[in-house]
Amino acid sequence: MARFLKSRHKAKGAAPGSLIFLGKQKMDNSSIRLFTYNKEKINEKSYTTIEKAFNDIKPDQINWLNIDGLHDIALIDKIKTHFKISGLALENVLNTGQRAKYFEDKNSLTLVTKAVYYDRELNNISVEQISFIICENTIISFQEKKGDHFESVRDRIRNDIGKIRDSSADYLLFSLVDCLVDHYLIIAEQMGLNIEELEKEITEAKKETSNTLFKYKTELSYFRKTIRPLKEVMTRILRSSHKIITKENLIYFQELSDLVEHAYESVDTYYTMIGDQVNMYHTYVSNKANDVMKVLTIFASIFIPLTFIAGIYGTNFEYVPELQYHYSYFFMWGVMVAVALVMLAFFKKNKWF
């Protein structure tokens, strides 16, 4: 399956809002977890059926329902019916090739984001789609597979750190997306350090260096493509007048928008830097080839007149006056050496080498 564009064959000709999973199944069975909390109490539980989770949702508390595994269409359909979520919203959730997106409905907001992973050994960027649907006091998060992206947020809730247990569901949404964006910056920093180290290898015209440079350029291009749409999403959230995004917490989304901008600029800077390094590498290789050609040209230039002299005295004419002279052979060598030295001196004077 292509990295930059996922196949949409399954959705071809389907009606808008159809629940069709587009992507690679990464879990055998979907996992269901529910966090309910307020200032006084907290409850955390896993479930085998979604109906049991529905029964434990508290209207007077903040509810965070997390679904790991998007392939179970029956499960997604039950969530749609229970929370009266638009089919268009869930269509975006199920399309794992979807770019970061913000979707408003009458009673809910949908935010599609990406979690980014970086394998330092393989120098490879991979992406997982993570989506959020917020309905008043309930947030539903959808992940392609189990992960620990939000463990720091869970710890803050468990230990009542900061204002998270005093705030509304939109603050929880901010906290979750903030974790993903922080990780963007961590990965950008890791890749940036490696790219800066590459400057030492550029002067060595090795095939491995060329391959590494192009690998970084491809991965940064993919990384940049992943982050860029989130800038538009944050702009739409800040301009939104939806009741779920409270004015009190709008300032946090502004900070998050600045963080997204910072992450994108960092990746874009390193993308430009690696492009410059590729150009420098090619320039160095070309200069090195030119130096070799310069030496070969000098040798060829010296041997052209020597070959001319040797050609004259290698003719088959019977009467060549110099051939009768006793020291002709040594005289010819002297002339050839003199010509070579004069040419070398001339090249050196004109700084041709």
Image (cartoon, rainbow, N blue to C red):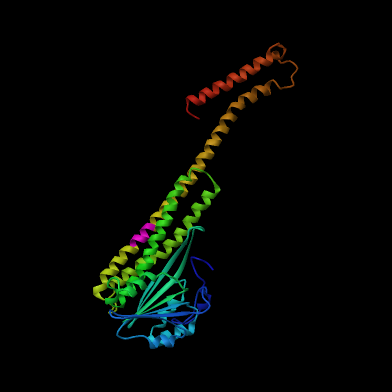
Residue bounds of the magenta highlight = 261-266
Residue 227: x and y in percent read 40, 64
Residue 235: x and y in percent read 31, 68
Residue 135 visible: no
Residue 108: x and y in percent read 34, 81
User: Foreground: 61 or 232?
Assistant: 61
Q: Is residue 314 left or right of residue 177?
A: right
In the displayed orientation, state which residue is furthest to the top.
326
User: Foreground: 59 or 12?
Assistant: 59
Magenta-drawn stretch contains 99? no
Which residue is at 32% across, 71% downward? 236
> Is 340 placed above or below 222 here?
above
Residue 3 visible: yes
> Is 234 placed above or below 65 here?
above
Q: Is residue 1 left or right of residue 238?
A: right
User: Foreground: 23 or 88?
Assistant: 23
Q: How many marks?
A: 0
Q: Is residue 44 left or right of residue 297?
A: left
